[in-house]
Amino acid sequence: MKLNIIAITAGALLLTSCEKEIIVDVPPHEPKLTINSVTYTGDTISVMLGKSIDVLKHKYGTNLGVNNAVVQLQAGDKAAVTMKYDNTSGMYISDMVAEPGITYSVKAVAPGFKDVSGTTCAPRVVEIQSLQRIKDVRLDMDGNMQDELRLTFDDPAGEKNYYIVIISASYMVNNYEETAYSGCVNTPDPSVETLYDESIDQNTCIESNGIFLRDELFDGKRKELRLFVRSTDLQAVEMPGLGMVYPTIEIQHVTEEYFRYIKSSRYASVNSGNPFAEPSNVYTNIKDGFGIFSVSHSEVMEIKEDYVYIAGA
C-alpha cells in the first residue's frame, strides 16, 4: 500500500508540474493604412483603402474603411491623377484602364497615418493556345472518375513569370447562381506548387481555386499543363434565362508580388487557430502599410465535354 501511495503522489506531482502560466506582453499596435487593389488588364483601376487594428480590439462588423484620404495614381512617367472616393462601393476609383507592360504607382495620404505607397508592373498578355478535355481518364485515390484537362500557353522568354490557374463550376441555390471549386485536382507537373511548397505527385490534392506555378522549368517555351479533375466537378447545368452554363478554366498571369501575397494570405487563413502551424506573415508590397497593389492578366474559357480548342483554328 505504501508503494502505491508513493506512486500516486509522484504521478500527481508530474501532472501538476506540467502547468505553467505565461503572461504575454503584447506590444502596442500602431495603426497603418492598408491598400487592397487587384485589377485585371482592360479594367479601370480602383483602390480599397482601410486601416489596420489591434487584433485584441477587433470586433466582427467593425468598419475599417478610410474615406478622408487623398489617393493618387500614376501610370509610368505621366502626371499622377487624384482618385475619387465612391460612397456606394467604399472605394477610390479612377478612369485609368490597366494596360499590359505599364508600371503603375499609388500613394495614399490620410490624417493620423503615415503615407503609404505601392508600385506594380502589369504583366504581358498570355493567351490560352489550346484546351482539351478527355473524359473518364482515370480513378483518383478514392475511386472517383476523373477527366483530364490539357491546357497550353506560351510563356514569355527571359523574365520570371507567375501563373494561377482556377477551375470553377456554377450551380443554383435558392434561385441564385453560386460558384463551386473542386477540392481535389491532381497533376504530375513539377512546376505546380502547393501552399506549403511541398513536393507533389499525381495523387496530391490541390484545390481548384488556386493552382500555382512559376516558369522556372519552362521559361520561354510552350507549356502544356495536365490536370485531372473529378468528372462530377465538371458538369454543366441549365439555368433559367441563361441556358447551359459550363464550368470554366481561368489562367491568370500575375506579378511576383501578387503571387507571394495570395499564397501567404491563404496559408495564414488555412492555418488560423492552429497552434502547431509555423508562424507566417502575409506578404505585402505596400511601403509603410499593409495589403497589395497589383495588376494581372486573365484568360477564361468554357470547359465542354469531349472539347478541343486550338487558337486560330
Image (cartoon, rainbow, N blue to C red):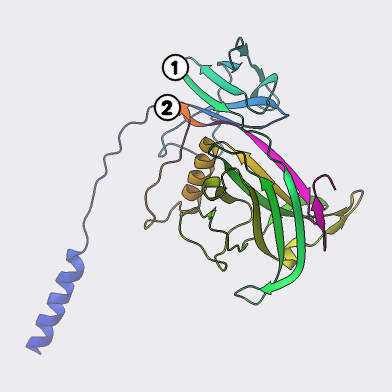
Percent across and percent down for residue 41 are: 69, 31
Magenta segment includes 84:
no
**Outermost residue, left side:** 2
Q: Is residue 110 left or right of residue 278?
A: right
Residue beneath the point at 50% across and 53% down: 195
Percent across and percent down for residue 76 are: 59, 17
User: What residue is shown with label 1?
Assistant: 112
Q: Which mark is residue 31?
A: 2
**Outermost residue, top side:** 79
| Front position in the image: 3 or 265 | 265
Residues at circles 1 and 2 in contact by the CB criterion of under 8 Å: yes
Please, is residue 146 above or below residue 153 in the view?
below
Residue beneath the point at 17% across and 70% down: 14
Which quadrant of the view contains residue 124?
top right
**Magenta-drawn segment:** 292-313
Magenta segment main secondary structure: strand
Q: Amino acid at mark 2?
A: Pro
